[in-house]
Image: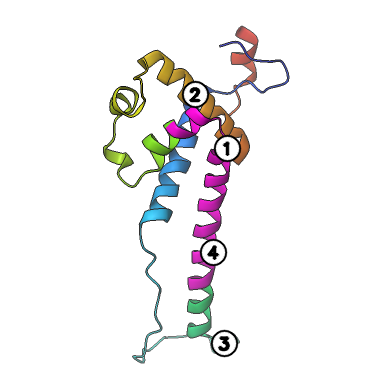
Amino acid sequence: MQQLDFLPELDRKKTQKAVESALSKYRLYKYLSFEEREASVTASYEGREGGRSNMTSDQTGSIAVHNIDSQVERKTYCERVERAVNRLPRMEKFLIQERYMSQDSEYITDYSVYCHKFNPPISEGTYGKIRWKAFYKIALSMNIEVLKEKEEYDEQ
């Protein structure tokens, strides 16, 4: 694929794996419910050797911080992915949303997307080109791109 000089040369396989991993994490955060931690009301013995540790334990406070921080982190991550995808051109955006961002995307194949979701259907080669362009842009947008190593870059 011909690239412009100012755009970085990416390692295709590693970048694709990074983007697919990010989209998988997105689905987990988006569609799985968050189970809040609760404070234990049962007293428990905690052995301390060597005397006091001079640390106070605020179980309720640390649980509240965890519950809030985790929810904020999940929401922020989902919004970041959605912003990156929403900036894509129409066909790339459609492909990523249908194949990688739906709740059932783990059960949807590439074949079903390029044959049944696109109207009119597109070829496997065209699908691959559109998907790579989308992955490239998402990787750069989310700063998860994997650059080709110097030796690989020089050989071409």
Mark 3 lies on residue: 56
Q: Is residue 122 left or right of residue 1?
A: left
- Crowd class of label 4 (few under 14; some 14 to 19; many from 20; radius 10 Å): few
Mark 1 lies on residue: 144
The earlier-in-sequence mark between 3 and 2 is 3
Residues shaded magenta: 66-94
Q: Is residue 39 left or right of residue 134?
A: left
Disc number at residue 87? none
From this viewpoint, is residue 144 visible? yes
> In front of the other: label 1 or label 3?
1
- SS assignment at label 2: helix
The earlier-in-sequence mark between 1 and 4 is 4
Q: CA distance from mark 1 to mark 2?
A: 14 Å
154 vs 119: above or below: above
Q: Is residue 119 left or right of residue 15?
A: left
- SS assignment at label 1: loop
- Crowd class of label 1 (few under 14; some 14 to 19; many from 20; radius 10 Å): some
- Crowd class of label 3 (few under 14; some 14 to 19; many from 20; radius 10 Å): few
Mark 2 lies on residue: 132
The earlier-in-sequence mark between 4 and 2 is 4
